[in-house]
Image (cartoon, coloured by chain):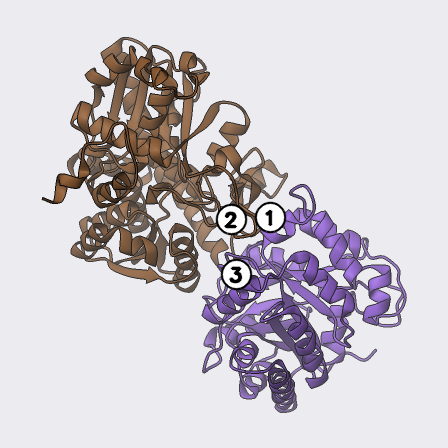
Chain colours: A purple, B brown
Amino acid sequence: MSDENRRPKEGNSRETRAESGGGRRAASDDAQYDSDIEAAIRENYPALITYITAGDPSLEATKEYVEALDRGGADLIELGLPFSEPIAEGPTIQAAINRALDAGTTPQAFFELVDDLETEAPLLVMTYYNMILQYGDEPDVRPFVERAAEAGLSGIIVPDLPAEESEPLRAACDKHGLDLVFIVAPTTEGERLERIMSQVSGFAYVQARLGTTGARANVSGATHDSLARLSAYNVPKAVGFGVSKGDHAAEIIEAGADGVIVGSALIDLIASSDEPSDAADALEAKAAELKRGARRGAETDEVAPEPEQP
Amino acid sequence: MSTERERDGESSRTGTFGEYGGQYVPEALMPAVQELEDAYERYVLENEDGFMDEFRERMREFGGRPTPLQRADRLSERYDREIYLKREDLVHGGAHKLNNALGQVLLAKYMGKERIIAETGAGQHGTATAMAAAHLDMPCEIYMGRTDVNRQRPNVYRMRMNGAEVNPVEAGSGTLKEAINETMRDWATTVERTHYVIGSVVGPHPFPKMVRDFQSVIGKEARKQIQEQAGRLPDSVVACAGGGSNTMGTFHAFVPDDDVDLYAVEAGGSSLEIDEAEGLAPNSATLSTGTVGVLHGAMTKLLQSTEGQIMESHSVSAGLDYAGVGPELAHLVETGRVTPASVDDEEALNGFHRLSRLEGIIPALESSHALGYLERAAGTAADEASGRSPRDEAHEELGDLVVVNVSGRGDKDLETVLEETEKRDLAAAPEVEVFDQ
């Protein structure tokens, strides 16, 4: 990664990040990491990254859930900004997105929620490209990124934006000090893998299996293949798509990942709870279970790199 | 392949038409999309292994090409100008859809794919794909929105008769948009051995160009036929536009002919107004009223809210009922080469009845929009007397020699037409109450 677009800034609490816009760190910071996201993964190895859909079933509930995940041990929190055509999602997250849209979740209200959130864990927004493009008066990605930085978000993940189309968003993210996280799929190989890995910021989102998001019973064999393919690259690697249990987290970390990403399993807890407070308790407990699992994987993984010393 | 990009050594964007087009797909699909780009260039553009020869031969023998260009005597009389109909309703399966479906299923075979998936709205693309897959011995699964499954039963039966599996999609309003979402999800899961036969000039590059190329036979034939039969190029060409595959197929050969005006007729539905609060667009007039955004792999014009949520579109014709449109067509409208127009459900229904009664051709409801526009733009003395709005300014521009693409036949629409006709007082309709007696 090049450092030419980094902006000098101080501190890394979410509040300071919000003031200075975005989560990129200056090269002169005491840590050697490029961004708050990378630091959150490296310093908290093995990292737990959680996803929930903002506005499912309401933005007030989302605030409670994010705080619960933060308490439970999430090291990074992805918030989904709902889009009506979520082509990368399986049934669980599709349903969450429908509930959020039915509740009237808008980008404006989403950013206001993020303005109010106080968490240890850096926050990322995960949404589809059209939502980013339409924020503001003209089809342009810049107003969204500017507002995201102002709200204190540290990064953006866009499931329908391959590296080939990412230049405008990449430039806007660089300007505002946000990470643009790329997905590496089981089908990503050769030159395309090279190109993506040369552009990675924050971490590489390793898609554990072909298909859509959704909790699964087992860790896919493709996970091990992908991690082996990526082992030569010195960037944090986090594995998502299908992770639902502490044992999965242990297996994935043992296979060489720096973090695990969990979404649908958390949304199942939200969907099956009668009261938001029940869901918050369940989310906190689940986050703790996953974090314990990840730690177990790190202990049994004798060849895994230790977290780099600050 | 990335060769084009590397040659140009500039922007990494590929497959664009002005600002439209591109490849906005999940990373897992990018290798497949690029593999398809490579196959498109080799087999379709360069005729490697005689692919295009085999395609054309099969379209002759299996598909029934070429289709006639027919002078419509009574319409010509009614509109006081020469009206010619390009008879795509006579393609095997009853619509232009086979041109593309057979091309893509054959291409999938050349690429060594083992399985075909496709979305369908009205069921015409699904039936065409199921026929092509049966013809070429490929397993085939079709995704179709629940609403469409219910309103297009005969097509569901036809697909199953041809051995395809039909998967109803329950999400959302259960129409084409949801069917495309679900097919993309299947493709993202099975991409290594599966080809997604997209049904229109939409989706990520190379689909818009490739589908246009398979469909361009419509305009190539029509351009040659009109010169043979009428002695010159037409003054205008009219085609309906949903996603835009028959539109681009008809227009492509005429685009360089600057003196030929091109009219893309969209579904005006019941109104051109958008209900932002409800997320509803009671029309599918994307070219006329849409705004720039990204859907299903391409940047194009969309029916969407100011926040970027895609609207539920509406048309009496299931095949036009889509909130997006092909990127190349959006570009041609933007540059002024193609003129967008829209006719509402009622004008389309009248167009349906008029062609059935005057010419003995029962057109698809999609094609009926092109015929509805003809009535409005060419005008008639009778209509002016009945106090309808003054003649469209397109009246003069339509000229003396007009080609209209009849993209499909209307057998599939009979139930819908009877139902919708009973609700209305339509000038061109027969007494439908007595049909069941």
Residue located at (80% from left, 53% from top): A5
Q: Position of residue A66 (x, y in %)?
A: 68, 76
Relative placement, left or right, of B285 versus B59 is right
Work out whether residue A106 or residue A172 is closer to the camera in this orientation and state it. Answer: A106
Asked if badges 2 and 1 are on one and the same chain, I answer no
**SS at mark 1?**
helix
Q: Quadrant of the N terminus of chain A?
A: bottom right
**SS at mark 3?**
loop
Work out whether residue B418 or residue A235 is closer to the camera in this orientation and state it. Answer: B418
User: Which mark is nearer the camera, 2 or 1?
Assistant: 2
In the displayed structure, B256 sits above or below B101; it is above
User: Which mark is nearer the camera, 2 or 3?
Assistant: 2
Q: Position of residue B297 (x, y in %)?
A: 50, 49
Work out whether residue B338 or residue A156 is closer to the camera in this orientation and state it. Answer: B338
Q: Could you say which disc has been placed on residue B295 in the image?
A: 2
Q: Position of residue A130 (x, y in %)?
A: 59, 50
Dividing the picture into quadrants, the one containing residue A105 is bottom right
In the displayed structure, A221 sits above or below A193; it is below
Q: Position of residue B55 (x, y in %)?
A: 25, 38
Contact between marks 3 and 1 (CB within 8 A): the answer is: no
**SS at mark 2?**
strand
Provide the residue designation for mark 1: A165
Tell me which amino acid carries mark 2. Leu
Q: CA distance from mark 3 to mark 1?
A: 16 Å
Provide the residue designation for mark 3: A188
User: Can see residue A50?
Assistant: yes
Q: CA distance from mark 2 to mark 3?
A: 23 Å
Q: Residues within 10 Å of mark 1 (few under 14, many from 20)?
A: some
